[in-house]
Image (cartoon, rainbow, N blue to C red):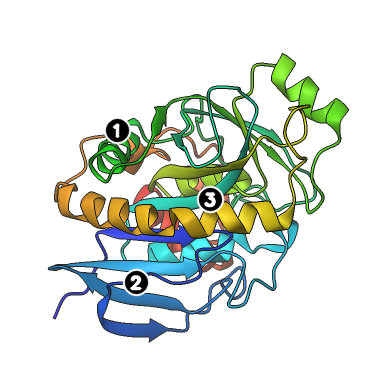
Amino acid sequence: MDRTPVLGVIGGSGIYQLDGLTSIEQRTIDTPFGAPSSPIVLGDLGDRTVAFVARHGVGHTIAPAEVNYRANLYALKSLGVERVLSISACGSLREDYAPGDVVVPDQLFDRTFGRAPSFFGEGLVAHVSVAEPFCADLSAALGDSVTQSGGQLHRGGALVTINGPRFSTRAESNTYRAWGMSIIGMTTAPEAFLAREAEMCYAVMAHVTDYDVWHITEAPVSVEMVVRTLNANTRLAQAALAALVRALPAERNCTCGDALHDALITSRANVTPALRRRLGLLVERYLA
């Protein structure tokens, strides 16, 4: 039986498993970049298969800067995943994006450091286009699914990714607001960029848990605040995911699947057999 997942789901803080799955199978996958954050869980939602990985590990043991983003995406790619949904907690940098709301962002600003930012390098160079860092088609379908499931949805907005694990200072938070950022999180970069390099569609269901620390009439963000709001939104996340899985067309109509077509700059003659083995899953069709 073909169990190619129609969607890969990366669960963030508070989302460590998916309810409602049947025919569950657990896969332990090794990658050229090490082990994923958790075993990959395959399961059926209705008549379609999804793959799930817990970004922070089982029991939330992995800090944002310690996540092996490359291994997580590579493992999903190895299972045939073409579309990836990130379920993430975020802080709001806007008055109108309130705790409990869901944001499907359309822009990304990277303020991280020290994370492996690319699958490429060490002999094979690629410059991938990320002017629009999220898949517009998948994001639109996700937004529709959140609305159908009763969520308070905001379409669009710029997500700034900070390194963590600490929360922002008030000066930092106000600076991001002045820059025009809408929400703040700790994990979307480099995850979104790696998904593009892997020619996978990528969208974020960002659950607003707090007003970060800029809002002087609200309490500063805390772990307890984040977890409480995420727990309240878990049912919404599960319902929206099920609706999205049902709605996804069999074939993609976006350009994500050809993201590397004009991105590889290294002469093919200089690509070593070792590099082909390491990155063949991503680039073999371009090295013929």
129 shown above or below 258: above
The residue shown at (22%, 51%) is 243
Crowd tier of the residue under label 1, counting other residues whose Cα lies within 10 Å: few below 14, some 14–19, many 20 or above: some
Element on which disc 1 rests: helix
Q: Which residue is mark 3?
A: 88
Q: Position of residue 16 (x, y in %)?
A: 51, 70
User: What amino acid does circle 2 point to?
Assistant: Asp
The residue shown at (43%, 59%) is 234
User: What amino acid does circle 1 point to?
Assistant: Ala
Q: Is residue 272 left or right of residue 257?
A: right
Q: Is residue 78 visible?
A: yes
Q: Is residue 94 left or right of residue 215?
A: left
User: What amino acid does circle 3 point to?
Assistant: Ser
Q: Which mark is residue 140?
A: 1
Query: N-terminal of the two: label 1 or label 3?
Result: 3
Element on which disc 3 rests: strand
